[in-house]
């Protein structure tokens, strides 16, 4: 079972923030070879949806309020841990 937690930036623990940035870097930079500035100043204005299972961050998405990236609210930085993506997708 995956435990879903959503928090504003200010409520993230240092461990949660580190783990989020680690997963984003693992997937976007290492696996997908997308070389861009991931830390873009939008995290502080966003909510962070985390899917945890047995202490491992399995899935993540950044939820941005209106006016941060677009006039409407938006979802970005959606990521699944590669070795667990089938398991996450099958349940949802």
Image (cartoon, helix red, strand yellow):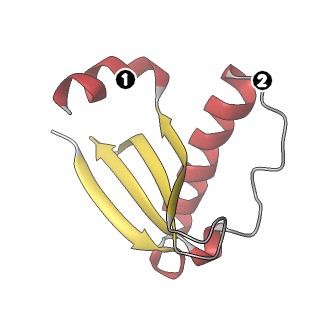
Q: Assign a secondary structure to mark 2.
A: loop
Give the Cα separation between the discs numbered 2 and 1.
20 Å
Q: Is residue 51 above or below residue 30?
A: below
* Residue at left offset 40%, top offset 71%: 7
Q: Is residue 83 above or below residue 58?
A: above
In the figure, is residue 50 to the left or right of 24?
A: left
* Residue at left offset 46%, top offset 63%: 48
Q: In which quarter of the image is the N terminus?
A: top left
The image position of residue 71, as x and y in percent, is 60, 72
Q: Which of marks 2 and 1 is in front?
A: 2
The quadrant holding residue 90 is top left
Q: Which of 23 and 34 is in front in this view?
A: 34
Disc 1 crowd rating (10 Å Cα; few below 14, some 14-19, many 20+) is few
Q: Residue at label 2?
A: 33
The image position of residue 70, as x and y in percent, is 64, 66
The quadrant holding residue 23 is top right
Q: Nearer the viewer, residue 18 or 8?
A: 8
* Residue at left offset 54%, top offset 71%: 46
Q: Residue at label 1?
A: 84
Disc 2 crowd rating (10 Å Cα; few below 14, some 14-19, many 20+) is few
The quadrant holding residue 5 is bottom left
């Amino acid at each position: 079972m995956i435990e879903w937690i959503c928090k504003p930036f200010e409520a993230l623990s240092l461990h949660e923030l580190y783990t989020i940035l680690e997963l984003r870097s693992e997937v976007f930079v290492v696996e997908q070879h997308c070389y861009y500035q991931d830390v873009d100043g939008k995290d502080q204005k966003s909510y962070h949806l985390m899917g945890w299972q047995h202490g491992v961050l399995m899935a993540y998405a950044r939820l941005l309020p209106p006016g941060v990236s677009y006039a409407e609210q938006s979802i970005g930085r959606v990521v699944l841990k590669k070795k667990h993506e089938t398991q996450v997708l099958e349940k949802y």
